[in-house]
Amino acid sequence: MTDLVERLVPDELWVLFRRVVPPTEVKRPQGGGRRRAHDREALAAIVFVATSGCTWRQLPPVFGPAWPTVCRRFAQWSRARVWAKLHRVILDELGALGELEWSRCAIGSVSVRAAKGPLTGPNPTDRGKPGSKIHLITDRNGLPLSLGISGANMHDSQGLEPLVRGIPPIRSRRGPCRRRPAKLHANKGYDCGHLRRWLRKRGIAHRIARKGIESSTRLGRHRRVVERTVSWPAGCRRLHRRYERKPEHFLAFVGIAAALIWYRRPART
C-alpha cells in the first residue's frame, strides 16, 4: 500500500501539497477515538479517483481511509481552495527555476458532457446535449497558467479576459513576479476587435486568426502546445464526463489534472 501511495503522490508533489493543506483540527484533545486518516493517503485516493474515473463508492480499501472519509476530505479541501493554492505554488516553483516560457502563450478550451449542476449548458458541438467547458492558458511549453470552467454554450471569446486576469503573479528567475505573456496565440473563436484592443492596452501582443481572411492552420506550430495540453487531461478519466453537481468539485478535478501535468511534464523525461 505504501508503494501505491508513493507512486500516486510522489515526494516532490507531497512536499508542495503540505504547504497548502489546512492544519489538522484536533476534535478530541483528551485523546482516544480512531486515528485520523493521513492526508497523504487521502490525497492518493483522490488522485486514484481522478485518474481512474471510478466513483467514490468504488474506491478500493487498499488506501486505508474509507470512501466517505476520502470524499469528505476532498470536499473540505475544495472549499478551502487547496487545489488552486497548489497550482499557484507549482507555478511559483516553475517560475523560480526558469521553466516557464512567457514569450508565446496560447489559449484554448475543450467541452465535456455533464450530467447536471450549475455551469452547464447545451453543447453546440454535441447536438445540444448538456455539457461543461474547460478553458485554459498555457505557456510556450504547454504548462497551464490559468484555468476556468463554464457551460458548454459559452463562447470561447468570453473566457479570454477572465483567464488572462486569472494568471497569478508568478515568481521569476530574475526580477519581479510576472503575470502577463509577451504574446498570446488564439484561434478564430477569439476573433473579436474588443479583445485585440483589450490585449494591446495591457501590453500583450496577440496573434488571433481572422475569420474569412486566413486559415487557422498557420497558427498550428504555436497553438499545438495548448491542443496537446487539452488532450493530457484525458488521462484524468474523471474529466471525460462531468459527474459533479457542484462546480467547485469539477474545477477541483481540473486543478488535480493540472498538477499531474506539471509532474509529468516533458521536461522531466
Image: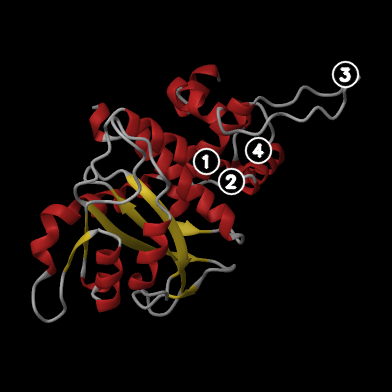
Say which residue label 3 marks.
31
- Observer-side mark, 4 or 1, equals 1
Element class at badge 2: loop
Q: As shown in the figure, which amino acid type bears the numbered disc 4?
A: Val
Which of the 4 image quadrants contains residue 66?
top right
Marks 2/3 in contact by CB < 8 Å: the verdict is no
Q: As shown in the figure, which amino acid type bears the numbered disc 2?
A: Arg
Which residue is most to the right?
A: 30
Which of the 4 image quadrants contains residue 153?
bottom left
Distance CA(mark 1)–CA(mark 3): 31 Å
Residue 264 visible here: no
In the rendered view, would you say 119 is above or below 174? below
Distance CA(mark 4)–CA(mark 1): 19 Å
Q: Earlier in the sequence, mark 1 or mark 3?
A: 3
In the rendered view, would you say 254 is above or below 198? above
Marks 1/3 in contact by CB < 8 Å: the verdict is no
Q: As shown in the figure, which amino acid type bears the numbered disc 3?
A: Gly
The label number, if any, that marks residue 70 in the structure image:
4
Q: Position of residue 173 (x, y in %)?
A: 29, 30
Element class at badge 3: loop
- Observer-side mark, 4 or 3, equals 3
Q: Tell me the crowding category of disc 2: few under 14, some 14 to 19, or many 20 or more residues within 10 angstroms, Cα based.
A: some
Q: Position of residue 127 (x, y in %)?
A: 38, 79
Q: Tell me the crowding category of disc 1: few under 14, some 14 to 19, or many 20 or more residues within 10 angstroms, Cα based.
A: some
Q: Position of residue 181 (x, y in %)?
A: 27, 51
Distance CA(mark 4)–CA(mark 3): 22 Å
Q: Tell me the crowding category of disc 3: few under 14, some 14 to 19, or many 20 or more residues within 10 angstroms, Cα based.
A: few
In the rendered view, would you say 9 is above or below 74? above
Say which residue label 2 marks.
81
The label number, if any, that marks residue 85 in the structure image:
1
Q: As shown in the figure, which amino acid type bears the numbered disc 1?
A: Lys
Distance CA(mark 2)–CA(mark 3): 29 Å
